Amino acid sequence: MVSVGVLGATGAVGQRFVQLLDGHEEFELTTVTASPESAGESYRDAAKWRVDTPIPEDVAGLEVRATDPDEIPDDVDLLFSALPSSVAEAVEGDLCEAGYVVSSNSSNERTADDVPLVIPEVNEDHLGLIDVQRDERGWDGALVKNPNCSTITMVPTLSALTGFGLETVHVSTLQAVSGAGYSGVTSMEILDNVLPHIGGEEEKMETESRKLLGDFTGSEVVWHDVDVSASCNRVPTLDGHLENVWAELSENPTVDEVAAAFAAAPSQDLPSGPDPLIHVFDEPDRPQPRLDRMLGNGMAVAAGGIQQTESGIQYNTLAHNTIRGAAGASVLNGELLAREGWL
């Protein structure tokens, strides 16, 4: 078994990590960290547990450690980061310099030239940047990122469309409140309402998508030249980001050809990998968050409502934002790192 730790284990995404790692066939969770205020407490006492399963018994009694290289045991092989980006920016580099491999959900450094931003089914070869990163930064460890939750929802479908000459993408998101964390949106803001702006979200979708779809040359990633424009909106659903996508293509595929391309999107033979990656609905009113967010144990992407437009294709896509879009994405990257011998 691979010994793993979770950084920022008491927060919303950190709790998802703990839940997803419970009973994992390859990973054993041995270390949890949080803020200095929680250090020294048991995980049971430090975490205001909000996930819809009980705290795993073998984790509940773990002592919460400070998020510091000196506090993490040497025998931990892999760290999963659920840290806020401001904290992650300050400590993830120190952890990598100390020799730890970090699979991070935090937004810092996602577009850095030497940091792999990875969706295993889309661009696993980008892990080759680890060699570049270690050479440039002098690290024995490594830092790997997964993209933003709304980007993860869309990019697998865009990857399936690249064979039709992907040129321009417009996307409007309907994002669940859990994406803002427990205290991110008050009930008085979101009930009977939609918030038509999520700070920084649009830029993340517009940049991260191009890096993910880019080509790794052996020394760098050449970003895809697709033009992505995003409008991001917070809606009163609990979990599951639904997105309306308009893709302009140089070719003119039929609805059936697009549906077949989605259905044929490659999966990965990893413990948390869904098969199929993209579940395609014929019904025009699917996918829906309440009905479809747990496809593939919350790790699949759903697509439906496919229609031809004058310049390409319009469709809807959905994924569970805190599973596939956050903790589950990092766990899947960790499984890929283990399989490919990077630990």
Image (tube, grey):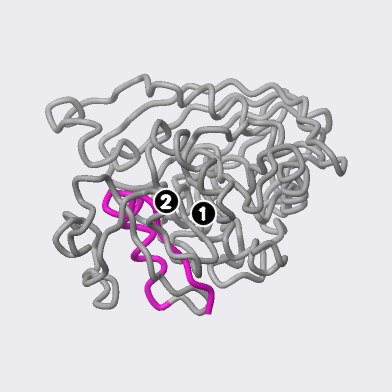
User: Image height check: is 230 above or below 36?
Assistant: above
The crowding category of the residue bearing disc 1, from other C-alpha atoms within 10 Å (few below 14, some 14 to 19, many at least 20), is many
Of the numbered discs in the image, which one, if any, rests on residue 184?
none
**Residue 276, horizontal then vertical, whole percent:** 61, 64
Question: Which residue is drawn at the image coordinates 65% and 61% (left, top)?
Answer: 337
Amino acid type assigned to the residue bearing label 2 in the image: His
Q: Is residue 5 magenta?
A: yes
User: Image height check: is 187 above or below 75?
Assistant: above
When asked about the image quadrant of residue 343, the answer is bottom right
Q: Nearer the viewer, residue 196 or 261?
A: 196
When asked about the image quadrant of residue 111, the answer is top right
Amino acid type assigned to the residue bearing label 1 in the image: Ser
Cβ atoms at labels 1 and 2 below 8 Å apart: no
Q: Nearer the viewer, residue 193 or 96?
A: 96
Magenta residues, as a range? 1-23
Residue that mark 2 sits on: 320
| Secondary structure of residue under mark 2 | loop
Q: Earlier in the sequence, mark 1 or mark 2?
A: 2
Residue that mark 1 sits on: 330
User: Image height check: is 333 above or below 315?
Assistant: below
When asked about the image quadrant of residue 281, the answer is bottom right
User: Image height check: is 166 above or below 320?
Assistant: above
**Residue 273, horizontal then vertical, whole percent:** 58, 65
Residue 321 visible in the displayed image: yes
Question: Which residue is drawn at the image coordinates 77% and 25% (left, top)?
Answer: 225
Q: Nearer the viewer, residue 121 or 287?
A: 121
In the image, 265: left or right of 327?
right
Gap in Å between the C-alphas at discs 1 and 2?
14 Å
Question: Which residue is drawn at the image coordinates 59% and 57% (left, top)?
Answer: 333
